[in-house]
Amino acid sequence: MSNNNPYLKIIQIMREQGSYNNPTSFFIGKVISREPLLIKVNGLQIDKSDFLISYGLQQSLYIGDSVLVLVSNDKQSFVVANKVVKE
């Protein structure tokens, strides 16, 4: 198809707007420090004042661990939900 196809341009705009209104609601973060607890998620470093964490999870986290981070729609609130592993 030609790059000058107006329908392709409309589809591209629709996809961009759809992703804007439906942001990803979770990310995989990496623990970069234990004390204080720091997590790098989606290029952003967040500390304990920036997120809630599942009860008892902090004691089982180590540098390099991957964690599931839930993000609010306004991208202002984070929840570290669980440790995740690849098997």
Image (spheres, rainbow, N blue to C red):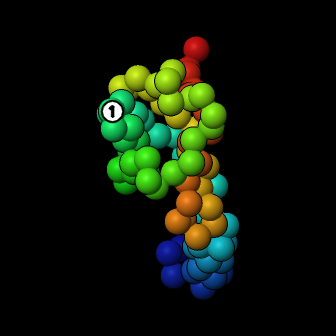
Residue that label 1 marks: 35
Residue drawn at 65 percent across, 73 percent down: 21
**Up-down relation of residue 17 to residue 23 (above or below):** below
Give how far across and how far down residue 44 sits, in percent: 37, 54
Q: Is residue 32 left or right of residue 81?
A: left
Q: Quadrant of residue 24?
A: bottom right
Quadrant of the rendering where the C terminus is positioned: top right
**Can you say whether 47 is above or below 4 in the image?**
above
State the quadrant of the N terminus. Answer: bottom right
The residue positioned 60% from the left and 28% from the top of the image is: 56
User: Tag 1's secondary structure?
Assistant: loop
Task: Please tell me how many numbered marks the rendered image carries.
Answer: 1
Dividing the picture into quarters, in which one does residue 85 lie?
top right
Vertical arrangement, residue 87 with respect to residue 77, above or below: above
In the rendered image, residue 19, in percent from the top left (x then y), is placed at: 62, 68
In which quadrant of the rendered view does residue 20 lie?
Answer: bottom right
Disc 1 crowd rating (10 Å Cα; few below 14, some 14-19, many 20+) is few
**Vertical placement of residue 6 versus 86, above or below:** below
Residue 75 in the image, given as x and y percentages of width and height:
54, 65
In the figure, is residue 38 to the left or right of 76?
left
The residue most toward the top is: 87
In front of the other: 23 or 75:
75
Q: Residue at x 51, y 51 (%)?
A: 51
Can residue 18 be seen? yes
Image location of residue 57, percent across then percent down: 57, 29
Image position of 26 (left or right of 39): right
Q: Is residue 41 visible?
A: no
Q: Amino acid at mark 1?
A: Glu
Q: Which of 12 and 60 lies nearest the eye of the viewer?
A: 60
